[in-house]
Every structure is written in structure tokens, then in C-alpha cells.
Amino acid sequence: MLESPITDHFRLQEDQKRALRRLKLHTIRDLLYHFPARYERAGDQTTVAGLVPGNDVILYGTIRKPETRRAWKSKRPMSEAWLEDGTGKVKLMWFNQPYIAKMLTDGVMVKISGRVEGGSSPYVANPEVVQVQSLPVGGTDTVFGDGESGDGLFAIYPESQGITSRWFRHAIAKVLKQVTTASIGDPVPEVMRKQYKLPALLTALVWIHQPKRQEDATVARKRFAFEEILLIQVLKQRERALHDTQATYPLPRIHEEIDTFVARLPFTLTTGQWHAIEMIASDMARTPAMSRLLEGDVGSGKTAVAAATAYGVVTSSPAERPSASLQVAYMAPTEILAEQHFASFCELFGHLPIQIGLVTGSGCKKYPSKVDAGKATKIAKKRLLAWVENGEIAILVGTHALIQQSVRFRDLAYVIIDEQHRFGTGQRQALARKDGPLPHLLSMTATPIPRTLALTMYGDLDLTVLDEMPPGRKPVRTEVVTANGRRSMYEAVRRELDAGRQAYVICPRIDEPDPSKALAVQTRSVKAEASRLQAQELKGYRIEVLHGQMKPAEKDAVMRSFLAHDVDVLVATSVVEVGVNVPNATVIIIEGAERFGLAQLHQLRGRVVRSTHQAHCFALTSEGGATTRLRAFVKAKNGFELAEMDLKLRGPGELYGRAQSGMSDVGMEALKNLRLVEAAREEAKLVLANDPLLEKHPELAHVLSLRATRIHFE
Ligand code: ADP
Ligand code: MG
């Protein structure tokens, strides 16, 4: 029953069907795993006279004057009505939901539940409305009777147009009546439930949807959090175990080669870089293939780590071809970055008898050129790829064109992925020759990831953290600026520009529920701010814009002219986060800084640490002075502290986006709990060690197969 479509069990209206699709709820199992956002208690019921902004309330009363109108600022259609009870009346407003007013009629008796907003003139925003036959007397009597659990706690589901919490309560109650412990199974083995005192699946479902007490709901949520992390861990570790059984290229002499390379570098490696290189080299010296994540702030010198280890690879030969070299693939997030890395590899490896290739969407290059041995030359893609396939190109640098266009290698021993979170072990598999050994994988990121998240999302990778900066780097001078600090800020910016430096102006992320609208609003604010600056504070300087609605080629062109200093000021959305190294940019202004996550602010600030000049970061806030978060941002030395703080203050959903991770809200919440994550990880290891094919855990295996296909499709 659990895997059958919801539509087989319930008669649904079109808008309900649409709502379920939007929520990605297809089967009965999905429905049962659609958890309440919160609960309301019958006691939350109050009267209009007792409203306090910020509270969730339940009111009984009579609807008056329902009407549709346009919102004052956004001009979007909305509904309004008044609710009258014996003590007074209050306005009800439904944003973006003009149809609600049409469904209500003057004089109808209702129960509404929602949050009180507004200050001196409070209103209830987007309340849920249920028509009732009679009004309670004196505010104590309840006229419930549908879907609430006995003691008056009832579930409120995440908001969605077209389907009500009431529908969910009914539907889920109906399903829960039909299932039994035996028919529902349980992916969490009983031993684990006992050890961590977690309720069985059916109990937990009842507790989360129809709790008698808040504590029951809490325990149930914990169980589902554990379940989700366990599933992810088993999936990731099963993937890992699969890799570990495959042959790879062992590189027993890699340590010596790396020493030779490092001796040639123009700087001394930091202890952190040595440590990272050592870990990578030890992995590579033996089998199975390395699977490692290197996490280090912008500017911490990850490229040197990648280059040194790549050197060890290209100076080694495949067993059956002693005069050839093993191959390296290096994947960068943008064309400009790919070109920059190609150029630095040509410089670093130019003295070796090897060839280096570049493949991007807009063309290919090869080094050295036949005509001029010190230079790179353009080359047709077909020829380049033929040389990659026969093993003549030792290092191939590229954008994701590298994996999209069926590039075939002869002896690919090392895959390096720079700052591309969507790519990982799967892409390595795609690049590897089907019949050949599995290449080593190094994934690099400057995004500070809290430990729980790293263990979960990258659970199939070993982790190395580079938490040290090369010496002599001046920390960015960071200031929180409020409205009256603007003038002196722009003075400082003009001084920098006049001294020949460049600046970024970042416009805020817009926290709108609809991301496509957010993009449009951001674009507008970028354009508006650019013309404002051009007309006022930064008159006479060369200003360009960069935003997410531009085509990749347009973005590229703008970045190139900024890099070439044909542009002084780049007004941008946060797309510059994973941007290009522009050492001459020494100033970054972040508008609406309070809207960004701390880790993101830190990454934005990272755009200006490359320079040997003193760099400045101005974080603008309208929140009347420095908040705790912004003060932490000013003080923090590295991104990891900030990432952990973000996780505590804002929660992981805010930070990493649910869609991106494929995780549910409950799973996301679990990321705040390191002990739970570590426990689930250990349990997953144990299960797989004792039962690698999950033959003794059929229910777990079944749920995993569902999950695997789903992640695949999303
Ligand atoms: P990221 O970790 O952001 O990729 P990069 O590898 O681009 O950082 O390094 C940033 C800059 O620091 C580069 O110009 C690089 O040459 C330089 N660098 C790297 N390691 C050191 C070091 N140990 N000492 C001095 N400069 C270094
Ligand atoms: Mg880098």
C-alpha cells in the first residue's frame, strides 16, 4: 500500500493534485513522510481583543466583507476580510491568494488559525480557514472533531496553495487507521531503536502526525532524523565500499616526485599545505583509489596542493608504457578559472616533457605549441580529444565540458574537481575508462562546511581541512556600516579607485519564496544600484553589472573586462562568490549584509584577500548597528567558525538549500546534532560491515532503493 499513488486512495480536486505534485508527494509513503511544520493546541484559541503580534492564534468568528484587491507595493492580487467575534474585529489577509476571498461569504462562521502580524494595527496573515456550524461559547468550548488528536494538539502542515492542513490531517488519519506494524515495516533495525530509544515506525508516524503531547512529536522527529541520516550514510558508504573494491593506480614513488616539485616553488609551503599533500600522497601510494575532500578558505593555497600531487602523477608512468605518463583531469567551475589554471599549470609544468590541454565550451588549447615551445596554441577540439584518448596529453584542464562531452582518457589516474559541489564520485566514474582502473579523486572547496554536513553530504569522502593562510597575507579590514557611515565609506572607495584599485559592490540576496522572482528582483536592484552609483557617489568611474540572469558568455565577458581593468567597479549579485581571482580588487561593499549567511559573507570577502595591498570589506546593514552575527563576521579569522555559527543561528536549510541536498527538513534539522550524525554514521558502518548486501535488512534495502531513484530524478 505504501508505494501506491495517493490518487488511488483519495478523490482529489485538480488544485489539490497540483499541490501534491508541487510538494513532490506521489505515494502514500510520501504522504506519511510529509511532516507537520508545527502544532496548534486548542488552548491557543483566543479572542480578537487578546491578539498579540507574533503569536499563533486560533479565532472563532464571523467573516465580514471578503474582497480581492491588489497589494500596495507589489501590486499582486490578494484577499482580505474581517473576522468579528464578541470582542472586536481583526483584518485577515492572504497574499497572492485572490481566490480565497471568492470562497468566503459575508456572515459565514469560521475557525481561523494563523500568525498575528503587524504592530499597532494587527492582522492575521495567510490564516487557514475552516467553516464551522457554531461558535464556541466563552472561548473554552471547542467544536473540533476533525483530525485533531484527542488532547487538542493538531498538526499544521507546511503551507501550500491548493491544499489545506485539514486535508492532510484527514488523509493521514485515514491511512494510519489502515496500516499495521507488520504492513508498514521499519527501515531502522530494532537493535538501533532500542539502543537510541527511538519509537518504531508506526508509533512514530502517529506521534508526529497526531501527538497527544509535544514531547511525543519531538521524539518522533528525532527518530525520523536518525532514519534519514542513517539512510544517507548507508547510501554514501555503500558507494564508497563499491569504489574501494575497484583497482586503481598505485603511485608508490609519489612522495619523491612531490619533493622535487615543491623545491621548485617560489614559496615555502604552509604546514597545512604539507599536511594535506602528505595525506593525499599516502592515499595515492596505495590502493584503493583516494576519495578526498579538501576544504580550505579562499586564498589558503589549494592550487599548490593540487599541483604538487598532480605533478607526482604525471611524472609516473602506466605499468605497460614506461615512457608515457599517467593523466590528470582538472575541472574548474568557470571558463576564466579554467584558463587561469591552465596558464599556471603551463608555467609550473613547462619544464617537463609533457603536454597540457584546455577544453571549455568556447574552444581548446594545447601546450606547448609546436611553433613556439614556450607558448600555448589554439587547437581543434577533435584533435585535442584524440590526443587525450591516446594518452599524449598528460593534464587536461577544463570546465564541466570535461564530463559533458564524452572525453576519453587512456590512463586517467587523478581527477581534481575545484569548487563544484554538484560533482563528485559520480563524475569520476563517468570520466574513468569502463575497463580501466578507478582514478584518484580530489574535490576542493572554499565553502566552509560544518562538520555534520560534510560527514553527511560528502559522507563518501575523507576530509582534509586547510585552516591556515600563507604568511604575510593582511587580513581584510572589515567594517559594519549603517546609513550615516555611507559618505565616508564612498570617500574611502574613491581613494582606492583613484589609487588604481578596483571594487565590488554586492547587492543583497532577496529572500522571496519564489526563487525565479528573487532573481528578477536582484537583477533589478543590481541595475538600479549601478545607475545610482554612476549618477552619484561613483560618477566618472567605469561601472559594470553582473547578475544571474545574464548568459554565461555575457558574464564571462564582463569578468574578463574586470580582470583586464577595463572596469573599475563591478556591481553584482552574489554570483561573484565562486568568481575569478582579480588581485587588483581591494574593496568589497556588501549591501544588505544581514540577509546573507555568515559563511557566504566570508566567501564574498574572500574575493579581495588575494591582493598584497590592504583590502577592505564594508558590510552595510539597515538593522541599526551591528548585530551579533555581523560582529562575528568582523572578528572571525576563518570560515569554519562562521559556518558552525550559521548552522546554529539560521539552521542548515537556510544555508544549503533543501533542494540542493535532496534532504528533508527533518534531516536538515538533524545536522545541528553532531552526536546523532556520528551515531548514524557508525551504525551505517556496522550494518554494512556485517551485511554488505543488506540481505538481513530488507526494509532498509527497499527504502534505500526508493531514495536512490528519487535523488537520481531530482
Ligand atoms: P585557493 O585555495 O583559494 O585556491 P590559491 O591556490 O589560488 O588559493 O592560492 C592563492 C595565492 O596564494 C596564489 O597566488 C598562490 O600562488 C599563493 N600561495 C599559495 N601557497 C602559498 C604559500 N605557501 N606561500 C605564499 N604564497 C602562497
Ligand atoms: Mg582555488
Image (cartoon, rainbow, N blue to C red):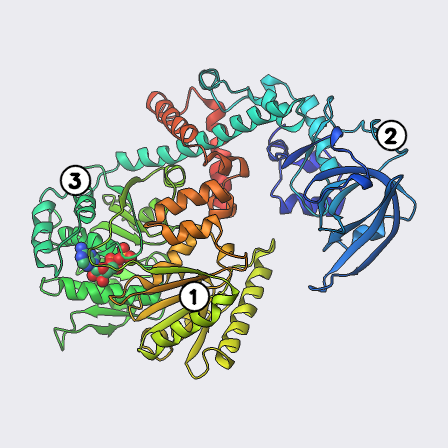
Residue 497, by quadrant, is bottom left
Inspect this view and state whether residue 401 appears: no
Is disc 2 placed on a helix, strand or loop?
loop
Mark with earlier residue (1, 3): 3
> As displayed, is residue 422 above or below residue 267?
above
Inspect this view and state whether residue 80 appears: yes
Q: Which residue is drawn at 21% across and 69% down?
A: 366
- Mark 3 or 2: the one toward you: 2
- The residue at which mark 3 appears reads as 282
Q: Which mark is residue 589?
A: 1
**Around disc 3, counting alpha carbons within 10 Å, would you say few (fewer than 14), some (14 to 19), or many (20 or more)?**
some
Q: Residue at x 36, y 44 (%)?
A: 641
Residue 641 vs residue 216, the one in the foreground: 641
Q: Looking at the picture, how far across and down is residue 550, in whole percent?
A: 48, 69
Amino acid type of disc 2?
Answer: Gly
Mark with earlier residue (1, 2): 2
Is disc 1 placed on a helix, strand or loop?
strand
Q: Which residue is drawn at 36% across and 26% down?
A: 682
Q: Looking at the picture, how far across and down is residue 270, in whole percent?
A: 17, 50
- Give the side of residue 145 with respect to residue 149, left or right: right
- Give the side of residue 390 with respect to residue 548, left or right: left
- The residue at which mark 2 appears reads as 138
Residue 650 vs residue 26, the one in the foreground: 650
